[in-house]
Image (cartoon, helix red, strand yellow):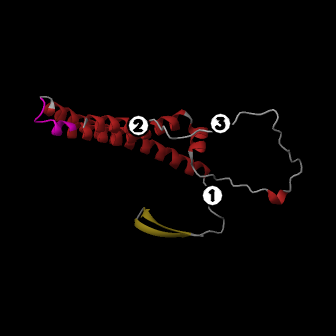
């Protein structure tokens, strides 16, 4: 049972450290030269002013605020799922050794306390990071989304000074 517990902890830690993720960084090579095109046809250019919100846009526009929100989201996920697995294995070990050793009850109590605290803290961090990223996405869409087309019509329903109204804009 001890080997299983150690193996479970090792897998949990290695998943949290992204051990299987490969990074490829290319260093500039002075022997590798590229061809520069000096003549550009205007019909080949495609300009898309609105770019979807991804990590590159988040880091470029919001910087450390986006990085902190991503860290909160990642730590929330790690604490929620990793802490749950780790505390569940501690509870299982405590139940398994309840009648053999003296520390079975303590392992169950400490595993239960760690389970409750990791779930509460993980959900709290996850929710806080998601809320911060959502506010950045709303701000990005508000500032950089394409404007409505000039010949586009819209139908709105909302409150007016005399009650509720329906408006058709064209």
Say which residue appears at 29% left-offset and 35% top-offset: 3
Which stretch appears magenta? 93-101
Q: Are marks 1 and 2 in contact (CB under 8 Å)?
A: no
The residue where tag 1 is placed is 147
Which sits in the foreground, 145 or 34? 34
**Left or right: where does residue 57 sit relative to residue 14?**
right
* Mark seen at residue 25: 3
Q: Which image quarter is the C terminus in?
A: bottom right
Image quarter of residue 30: top right
Which secondary structure, mark 1? loop
Residue furthest to the right: 39
**How far is the residue under mark 1 from the one under mark 3?**
38 Å
Where is residue 5? Give x, y as percent.
29, 36
Q: Say which label, 3 or 2, has the lower sequence index.
A: 3
Which secondary structure, mark 2? helix
Q: Say which label, 1 or 3, has the lower sequence index.
A: 3
Classify 10 Å Cα crowding around label 2: few (below 14), some (14-19), many (20 and above): many
Where is residue 26? Give x, y as percent.
69, 36
The residue where tag 2 is placed is 75
């Amino acid at each position: 049972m001890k080997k299983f517990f150690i193996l479970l902890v090792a897998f949990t830690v290695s998943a949290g450290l992204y051990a299987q993720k490969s990074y490829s960084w290319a260093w500039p090579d002075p022997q590798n030269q590229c061809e520069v095109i000096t003549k550009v046809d205007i019909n080949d250019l495609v300009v898309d002013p609105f770019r979807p919100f991804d990590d590159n846009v988040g880091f470029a526009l919001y910087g450390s605020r986006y990085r902190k929100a991503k860290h909160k989201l990642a730590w929330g996920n790690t604490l929620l799922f990793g802490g749950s697995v780790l505390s569940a294995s501690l509870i299982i070990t405590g139940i398994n050794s309840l009648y053999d050793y003296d520390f079975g009850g303590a392992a169950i109590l400490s595993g239960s306390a760690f389970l409750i605290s990791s779930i509460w803290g993980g959900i709290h961090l996850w929710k806080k990071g998601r809320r911060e990223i959502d506010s950045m996405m709303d701000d990005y869409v508000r500032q950089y989304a394409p404007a409505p087309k000039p010949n586009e019509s819209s139908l709105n329903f909302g409150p007016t000074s005399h009650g509720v109204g329906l408006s058709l804009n064209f």
